[in-house]
Image: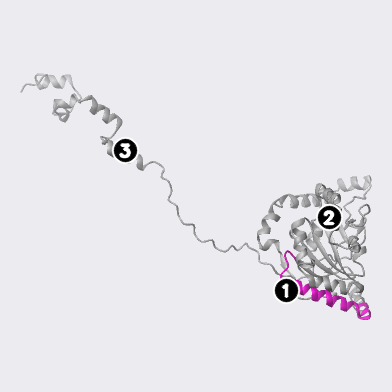
Amino acid sequence: MSSPYGHPSIRAKTFPHATTSAMLQPRFLLTRPRSLLHTQWLYPSCQSPLQWLYRRTSTLPQTPKPTTPPPKQPSDGDPTPNPLSRPLGQPKPPIPGENSGIDYRTWRERRADFVNYDKHLERRKALTKKVAKPYFREWTNMRHHRGKTFLSPPKLFRADSALYFPNMMGYTLATPSTTTSTTSVLTDKTSIVSVFSGTWAERQTLTFVGEKRNPALAVEVEKLEGEGLQRVWINVEEDWMKAGLIRLFLGSSKKGKSRAEWGRSFVVRRGVDDDVRDSIGMANGKVGYVYLVDGNCRIRWAGSGDADPGEREGLIGVARRLVESNRRPESGKKREGVVGAKAEH
């Protein structure tokens, strides 16, 4: 069969770059059908349509299969409340009128403190501490034991090692137009003091001192009221709007309290800063706290959060024991003399 190009030398001159294998290919490959050319363009690498479709679908993102989550391990950050092992309070006795939140400095004294570099460092340190505190940290901590931070001690704190309950300034339900110091109400009395901020915290304190939750304590208070045992409520509300609502609905706050207890129910607007809170163990401002304070304004017992049955009974026992210790004035005076001598030493 003769070649269409004639002699091989003519083919070499016509196609100088063609190889021998290319020249030996059959002629029908040069004239491929148009459908085959389109198929090769759509499916490269000489793949068939089925092979191309399989590889195409295998590279698409697949829906993850549902898997069973692993069991939740106990978190090491879950704080377990422990019994209170140290006295709470401030080292100095409270003075009526302090912690009022009112700045009594003159303009000259304010200017001197403003340009004082040491005072500036103190203010910056306090602001840094305040800004670094997460806004929702107190609400987040409520999931752990409903905010309970410590358990009540089984016994009273000794008088010579107990610390003082700080003074707070606020108006009472009996005299909403005047400001009263809590120290004047606590002095020379055995007081069960409830400190809270908000309805949630108030309900927690009622688990300790409420007549429905702890009726035995109400009977004990009524029996020992003539010997100086009393209940005191301190509502710390720094938000001016909430404080205005409390003042507007004073009638509802008076319900459930006798007329004598109106003068022992305080609403405190300011003066309770972080130092005061830390000194009395108020780690969470959204939680209610209960303190047993003696006639010298010393904290002898404390409780936080919701009361356990053992804590309710323990509060009754320590309150009765503290009242009985006040019946021996001579031993009390002797103890006070020893404390004074230690302080002077």
> Can residue 285 be seen in this snapshot?
no
Q: Residue at x 42, y 51 (%)?
A: 65
Residue 315 in sight from this viewpoint: yes
In the rendered image, which quarter is residue 216 located in? bottom right
Q: Is residue 213 above or below residue 19?
A: below
Density class for disc 3 (Cα within 10 Å; few <14, some 14-19, many ≥20) is few
Spatial separation of the CA atoms under disc 2 and disc 3: 76 Å
Q: What residue does disc 3 label?
A: 53
136 to the left or right of 227: left
Report helix, strand or loop for mark 2: helix
First in residue order: circle 3 vs circle 1: 3
Q: Position of residue 178 (x, y in %)?
A: 94, 53
Report the front residue among 122 and 154: 154
Mark 1 secondary-structure assignment: helix
Query: Of the residues tagged 2 and 3, which is closer to the observer?
Result: 2
Is residue 179 depicted above or below 281 in this figure?
above
Mark 2, residues whose alpha carbon is within 10 Å: few (<14), some, or many (≥20)? few
- What residue is disc 1 on? 310
Location of residue 307 in the rendering, given as x and y in whole percent from the top left corner: 73, 67
Of the 4 image quadrants, the one containing the C terminus is bottom right
Q: Amino acid at mark 3?
A: Leu
- Magenta residues span 304-333
Residue 310, position as x, y percentages in the image = 72, 73
N-term mark: 1 or 2: 2
Q: x, y percentage for residue 80?
A: 66, 66
Residue with the mark numbered 2? 252
Q: Tell me how far mark 3 sits from mark 1, CA to CA.
A: 73 Å
For the rendered model, the colour scheme is one colour
Q: Nearer the viewer, residue 138 or 146?
A: 146
- Left or right of 308 in this view: 57: left
- The residue depicted at 77 percent of the width and 63 percent of the height is 205
Q: Amino acid at mark 1?
A: Gly
